[in-house]
Amino acid sequence: MTLRRIDFIPIPAGAAPGFDHADVYRAGRRLYVAHTGADRVDVLDCENLTYLRSLPGLSGVAGVLIDEPHDRLFTSDRGAARVSIFRCSDEKLLGQVAVGAHPNGLAYDPARRRLYSFNLGNPLGVDCSASVVDIATLHVVATIPLAGRPRWAVYDGDRDTIYANVRDPAEIAVIDCARATITRTLPIPSAGPHGLWLDGDRLFCAADGGDLVVLDRDSGAILASLPLPGVPDVLMHDARLRRLYVAVGDPGVVCSFDSDRLEHVETVATEEGAHTIGWDPFGQNLYAFCPTSGGAAIYTER
């Protein structure tokens, strides 16, 4: 299988260029992407490959995370030091909660209905933390100090654990959700852990040092380290195709890997600065968000 570009969706410009994280609402075939430079989340129709509308007023929005079972859409509004909670099906704003300075990555504990906001601190990299937000009461119920600037994070339902990348020291913080505390860390042998994905018992960590590091979630043993052509950001994975996609903003490519064999499949050109991607599992389409062209380039597996 290879990626082929099939379409482009223009997205209205904001005050400044720049997209960040994206997630897909499968029930509605909609993709939501943080349009940081426009202070809004843009909504795309994955069935008709069109721009639908935006959710405005989200200052410096960076993170977007969807929980389908609870019909929730979460955003981290970096410019306002808060998270926003929407009902995803009708996009109604349900509440906003103040968290630590410059929130970025998000993870959700569905068992306790708690949202974790990973905060970059103020100034950036100082007093970094994770704010734990109770969704029922819309209050912060715990604050977890972090050793350094956090990146992306994932929840592991099998282990009732959240894994969170920390740029420096280069490690993955392992958070016990029952206690809302860091119980251990997994060292990463490449500078600047950034994008993160959990597949079964393996963690895929894309690091600024130009490596895709694969490690065992329990032991932390390094299973593979695969080279990347630049500084990576977002990871997306399709469980059926067994494909892992890594966005590299400079030189502007997406790298595809076979997630079973842990082998590089191909590298496809996108656009300089396109460090954000989204994946539609129904259409098997990859969305690369292009800040210069002002829209989403769409690639499909053939």
Image (cartoon, helix red, strand yellow):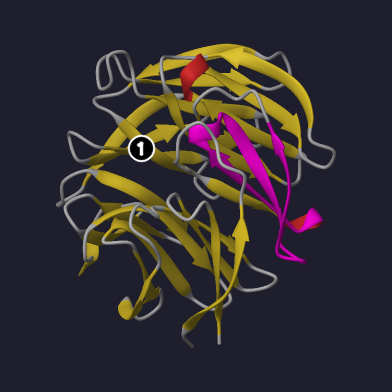
| Residue occupying image coordinates x 16% and y 46% | 191
Query: Residue furthest toward the right?
Result: 90
Residue 195, x across and y down, in percent: 37, 50
Prevailing SS of the magenta stretch: strand
Q: Is 101 left or right of 250, judged from the image as shown? A: right
In the figure, 128 relative to 280: above or below? Answer: above
Q: Can residue 156 be seen in this view?
A: no
- Secondary structure at badge 1 equals strand
Residue 251, x across and y down, in percent: 26, 61
54 falls in the magenta region: yes
**What amino acid does circle 1 point to?**
Arg
214 falls in the magenta region: no
Region in magenta: 28-55
Residue 256, x across and y down, in percent: 39, 73
Residue 101, x across and y down, in percent: 41, 15
Q: Can residue 30 be seen in this view?
A: yes
Label 1 belongs to which residue?
A: 151
| Residue occupying image coordinates x 49% and y 76% | 242
Q: Is 265 left or right of 43, judged from the image as shown? A: left
